[in-house]
Image (spheres, rainbow, N blue to C red):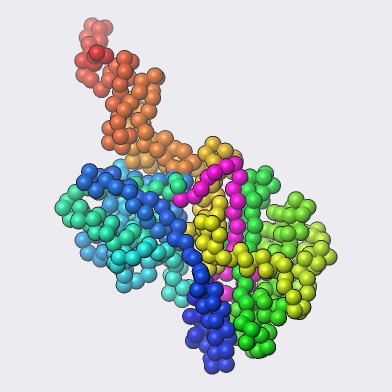
Amino acid sequence: MMMMMITCMASSLSKKLTALLLILTVVFSSSVSARFVVEKSSIRVLHPQSLRSKHDSAIGNFGIPDYGGFMVGSVIYPDKGASGCQPFEGDKPFKSKFPRPTVLLLDRGECYFALKVWHGQQAGAAAVLVADSVDEPLITMDSPEESTDANGYVEKIGIPSALIDRAFGLSLKEALKKGEEVVIKLDWTESMPHPDQRVEYELWTNSNDECGIRCDEQMNFVKNFKGHAQILERGGYTLFTPHYITWYCPRAFILSSQCKSQCINHGRYCAPDPEQDFGEGYQGKDVVFENLRQLCVHRVANESNRSWVWWDYVTDFHIRCSMKEKRYSKECAEEVMKSLDLPIEKIRKCIGDPEADVENEVLKTEQEFQVGRGSRGDVTILPTLVINDVQYRGKLERTAVLRAICAGFKEATEPQICLTGDLETNECLERNGGCWQDTQANITACKDTFRGRLCECPIVKGVQYRGDGYISCQAYGPARCSINNGGCWSDTKNGLTFSACSVQ
């Protein structure tokens, strides 16, 4: 993240102050017109009647949002520890004892958003809402810097979370204080556009493998998601494009040693020093050069309809050419290309001359793409995944991302990979999905679909059941007495059955 780099460098030795000024200038000049889009999901209050309404919420950038699905749950506001900054007492005190899962409402402040959600998950909540403490537009809850996550809890968060505005939070708390049951529907069905049979997605990433938890996260994702990505791309179901962020060096600093070590093409395309130490190790320009090479691998492979080879190249480069092993170089990169039967000369031509005082067509295009277009917003965080022109929020994990991509297909056009057991779990197995059921007649209102379970009164043997699908379903129509005697009294004597069920 840009601001993460500024924070880290601010504590460096005095010899790095010039570099700090350089990056601050670049970030400030680019952020003046920046437009960061807060990705949202909707929340509908179903009960009590006096609160029935629809609200926006800002999707948290950790955990697993249920893209394409929804969740109906009962809201709980803790009697004590409402900030969620300390573990809650007891063994999963908020684990629901009722058909509906628990949505835990917490207050903003005192600690990191992710820590609140982690404590909520540990206490048995199925989702966490954080109520803002001030009246302001919604913001995105992001994960903390790696130095604050000593226990690695961020990666363990597996539930959805969202920030809601102060007024909405107050209205929920007031209803709960009165002893009313508050039931809400968290809805992600429209958080991911699904216009047609092909999903376009892009990954903003980085070839630097020495930048800590962010770099580890994106490389683990590339390695783990490679199989899914290649199946989707080979089948023509998706169009994937990798992207890389670069900055430019202000004209006044072009001749400085810091700029020369961080940039190529005379200060036009720059990246921070990997070790944040200009005296040793690799330089920022080494990262820019490899980023450019990876872009060209994708471009050239795409020309021969082998765009999915990018996933092989990036994975193999990370394994064979890491900075840690001192093999992060052009020579090692070309060994990887050769092993993948990639045309090295074409890729060299695409890269061009990094020492020339000219624009690089590939990197210039990348800088233009960094600026938000349409609904996407500016890309300011690495890594960033964009699906159907919407920035993905949540854990960068194989199954979570595949679910989000699958939610981007027009309904009923999802490829087979979206319908596998690895992704499509039967949500009706546990507590009947929180839906109505008649155990005697073995009838349930729970329907398991890719986009989540639905509580919908069924049609059984031509008999239509009606109701809310959660608490009640009743049979209607002339044939209703044929199923479980319509729920009425019945008795059999001397071979004759007597029933209180009437079709009139």
Point out residue 474 in the picture as x, y percentages from the top left corner: 28, 26
Q: How many marks?
A: 0
Instruction: Measuring from the top left, give residue 140's x and y in whole percent.
Output: 42, 63
Position of residue 36 measured from the top left corner of the image (x, y, whole percent): 48, 65
Tell me what residue is drawn at x 47 percent, y 38 percent: 449
- Is residue 434 placed above or below 326 in the rendered structure? above
Name the residue at the left extreme: 178
Residue 194 falls within the magenta-colored stretch? yes
Which residue is more in the foreground, 267 or 309?
A: 267
The magenta stretch is: 191-217
Q: Examine the rendered structure and indicate whether residue 87 appears above or below residue 400.
A: below
Is residue 456 visible in this depiction of the protein?
Answer: yes
Q: Is residue 115 left or right of residue 207?
A: left
Q: Say which quarter of the image contains residue 287.
A: bottom right
Image-based side of 205 in relation to 482, left or right: right
**Image position of 344 with respect to 409: above or below:** below
| Residue at the extreme right | 345
Q: Quadrant of residue 356?
A: bottom right
Q: Residue at x 61, y 82 (%)?
A: 250
Q: Is residue 414 magenta?
A: no
- Above or below, 175 relative to 454: below
> Is residue 466 shown left or right of residue 191?
left
Q: Which quadrant, please, contains the C terminus?
A: top left
| Picture residue at 57% right of the left edge, 65% below the top | 371
* Name of the residue lying farthest toward the bottom: 14
Is there any visible trace of residue 319 in the rendered image?
no
Q: Residue at x 23, y 55 (%)?
A: 171
Residue 6 drawn at (x, y percent): 51, 80
